[in-house]
C-alpha cells in the first residue's frame, strides 16, 4: 500500500538517507536553501536507472551552477551502491539500504513486490523543501531527466512572483 502521491506545493516528507561511505543525511533539510532533485531508483541492476544516474552526473556542473543539488536512493545494499558509485564516478550523494515500504509510505512511490524495490520516482524541490514536480513510474521507464529539471528551475525562477 502506498501513501497519497506528493503534489506541487506539498512539503517533502522527512526522510533519513544512509549514504555510501557511512554518512547519513536528512531530506529535505540537506537541500535547504537550494533546489533539489531526489531520485528513487530501482537498483544498480536496472539499466534505465544507471542511465538516469549517469545523465545527472554528466549534467551536474550545469545543475550546480543553477543551484540544484541531486540525491539518489535505492534498496541496494551499501557494497552494491558503492560499486555503482565507483564504476560510474558518481559525485552526488547516493543512498543505500532503503526500506521500500517505509519510503513508499512517506512519498507515495510504487513498490515492486517480489523482489522488493522502489519503482523509479523523482522529485524536484524548491529551496523551502516543497515539491515543484513529482514523477512517478510504475515500471522501468518514465523518469526525470536533467535537461527538464534545469529548464523547470530556470522557468520557476524567471516567473517567480
Image: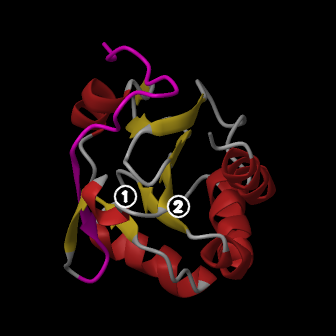
Seen from the viewer's position, the closer of residues 96 and 114 is: 96
Seen from the viewer's position, the closer of residues 77 and 145 is: 145
Q: Is 153 placed above or below 11 here?
A: below
Task: Kindly identify the residue that appears in the image at 45 percent across and 63 percent down.
Answer: 71
Badge 1: few (under 14), some or many (20 or more) residues near its Cα, within 10 Å? many
Residue stretch rendered in magenta on the structure: 1-21
Q: Is residue 116 magenta?
A: no
Seen from the viewer's position, the closer of residues 86 and 12 is: 12
Task: Kindly identify the residue that appears in the image at 39 percent across and 27 percent down.
Answer: 10
Task: Kindly identify the residue that appears in the image at 68 percent across and 70 percent down.
Answer: 54
Relative placement, left or right, of 127 versus 105 is right
Q: Is residue 2 magenta?
A: yes
At numbered mark 2, what does the secondary structure look like: helix, strand or loop? loop
Residue 123 placed where, x, y %?
52, 42
Q: Is 1 placed above or below 18 here?
A: above
Residue 45 placed where, x, y %?
56, 57
Is any atom of residue 138 visible in this view? yes
Residue 65's mark? none
Q: State whether the magenta stretch is mostly helix, strand or loop.
A: loop
At numbered mark 1, what does the secondary structure look like: helix, strand or loop? loop
Q: Is 2 placed above or below 141 here?
A: above
Residue 44's mark? 2
Relative placement, left or right, of 38 versus 55 is left
Q: Quadrant of residue 102?
A: top left
Q: Earlier in the sequence, mark 2 or mark 1?
A: 2
Residue occupied by mark 1: 76
Residue 112 placed where, x, y %?
44, 28
- Are the two marked residues, 2 and 1, in contact with CB atoms closer than 8 angstroms? yes
* Count of all numbered marks drawn on residues in the image: 2
Q: Is 66 placed above or below 26 here?
A: below
Amino acid at each position: 500500500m502506498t501513501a497519497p502521491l506528493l503534489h506541487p506545493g506539498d512539503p517533502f516528507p522527512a526522510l533519513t538517507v544512509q549514504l555510501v561511505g557511512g554518512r547519513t543525511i536528512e531530506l529535505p533539510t540537506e537541500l535547504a536553501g537550494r533546489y533539489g532533485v531526489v531520485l528513487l531508483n530501482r537498483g544498480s541492476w536496472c539499466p534505465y536507472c544507471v542511465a538516469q544516474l549517469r545523465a545527472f552526473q554528466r549534467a551536474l556542473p550545469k545543475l550546480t551552477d543553477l543551484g540544484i543539488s541531486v540525491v539518489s536512493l535505492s534498496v541496494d545494499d551499501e557494497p552494491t551502491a558503492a560499486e555503482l558509485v565507483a564504476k560510474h564516478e558518481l559525485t552526488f550523494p547516493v543512498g543505500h539500504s532503503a526500506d521500500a515500504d517505509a519510503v513508499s509510505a512517506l512519498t507515495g512511490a510504487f513498490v515492486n513486490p517480489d523482489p522488493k524495490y522502489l519503482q523509479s520516482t523523482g522529485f524536484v524541490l524548491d529551496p523551502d523543501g516543497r515539491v515543484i514536480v513529482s514523477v512517478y513510474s510504475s515500471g522501468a521507464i518514465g523518469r526525470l531527466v536533467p535537461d527538464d529539471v534545469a529548464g523547470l528551475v530556470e522557468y520557476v525562477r524567471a516567473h517567480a512572483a
